[in-house]
Structures are given as structure tokens and as C-alpha cells.
Image (cartoon, rainbow, N blue to C red):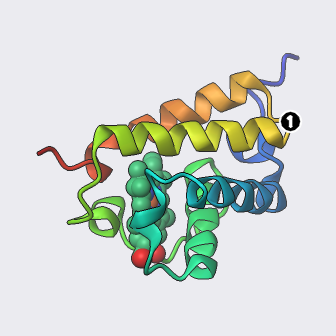
Amino acid sequence: MSGTQTTTLFERLGGEEGIAAIVQTFYDRVLNDPLLQPFFRHTDMNRQRRHQTQFLIYATGGAPRYTGATMRKAHEGLGIRHQHFDAVVSHLAEALRQHQVKEEVITELAKRLETLRGEVVEEE
Ligand code: HEM
């Protein structure tokens, strides 16, 4: 068995613990990026990490325990452009590489997040 069809993305990311660790690395990177840091100036990052972890668990096939806002509501009025979305996805991909996640898994998650672009990005 190749395994790629039989395990969920959730399992291939290391389950809840794996995802929580990846989210930590991800926001360390985001907060170090001058393009993205200003968006999180007033954000409670502990809450943000918790919600992002729950969201990714749910979005990858784990337990649906996400209690935050919808993606459209959460990002409404923030002025997020395509360049910000691209930068966020690229930091997530790098965080996944830092956690030794396989390229095929990174590609699959990136594809899934791509489906949310229209809910996060606001056109000028
Ligand atoms: C597919 C990509 C993205 C996903 C899955 C995602 C996920 C989330 C989640 C789960 C929340 C928490 C909502 C809540 O607590 O109710 C959130 C809030 C937020 N996201 Fe995103 N996000 C994405 C892209 C982006 C981008 C591109 C930016 C821009 C830099 C961004 C900036 C923010 C900000 C500023 C908040 C609100 C923080 C606050 O409440 O202070 N997100 N996002």
C-alpha cells in the first residue's frame, strides 16, 4: 500500500500534537515577516494559535472542534490582498518543511487552503 490514499492529511501531519507544533513555528515565522506582522498587532496570539490549530485539525480530517469564526467573518475588513495570502501559505509550507513533513503532504494542504482564498482575500 502506498499509504497516500488510506491516511488522512490530519494523520500525515502528526495528529493534534504535530499540528500544534507546526502552528507554533508558523506564527513565529509570520510575526517575523514585516509584510504580515502588522495584521497581528492587536491579536491575542495564544487564542490565535489555539483557533488555527483547531481549524487545521478540522480542515485536514481530524475532530471538528473549531469554535472560531468562519473564514470570511474572521478576515473581513482586514484588507488582506493576494500577496498576503501567498506569503501566509508560503510560511506555512516552510513551517511544514521545518517539521519534516513530506512535500506531497505540503502540496495537498496548500491545495486545500487555496480553496479558501476567496473568503480571506478582499479585492481592491
Ligand atoms: C487559508 C489561509 C488562512 C487560514 C486557514 C486562516 C485561519 C484563521 C483562523 C482560524 C483565525 C481565527 C478566527 C477566530 O478566532 O475566530 C484567523 C484569524 C485571523 N487571520 Fe487568518 N487565516 C488565513 C489567512 C490569513 C491571511 C492571509 C492573513 C493576513 C495576514 C490572516 C490574518 C488573520 C488575522 C489578522 C486574524 C484575526 C486575528 C484577531 O482576531 O485579532 N489570515 N485566521
Regarding mark 1 in the picture, which secondary structure is present there? loop
Q: Estimate how packed mark 1 is, as few (under 14), some (14 to 19) or many (20 or more) residues with alpha carbons within 10 Å.
A: few
- For the point 61% across and 56% down, the residue is 32
Q: In the picture, which quadrant includes the N terminus?
A: top right
Report whether residue 111 is seen. yes
- Res. 4 image quadrant: top right
Q: Does the beta carbon at disc 1 come under 8 Å from ligand 1?
A: no
Which residue is outermost to the top?
Answer: 2
- For the point 27% across and 45% down, the residue is 81
Q: In the rendered view, would you say 86 is above or below 44?
A: above
| Image-quarter location of ligand 1 | bottom left
Q: Amino acid at mark 1?
A: Gln
Q: Where does label 1 land, which residue?
A: 100
- For the point 50% across and 77% down, the residue is 67
Number of numbered tags placed on the structure image: 1
Which residue is outermost to the front?
Answer: 34
Q: Nearer the viewer, residue 81 or 74?
A: 81
- Res. 25 image quadrant: bottom right
- For the point 27% across and 64% down, the residue is 78
Q: Position of residue 43 (x, y in %)?
A: 47, 78
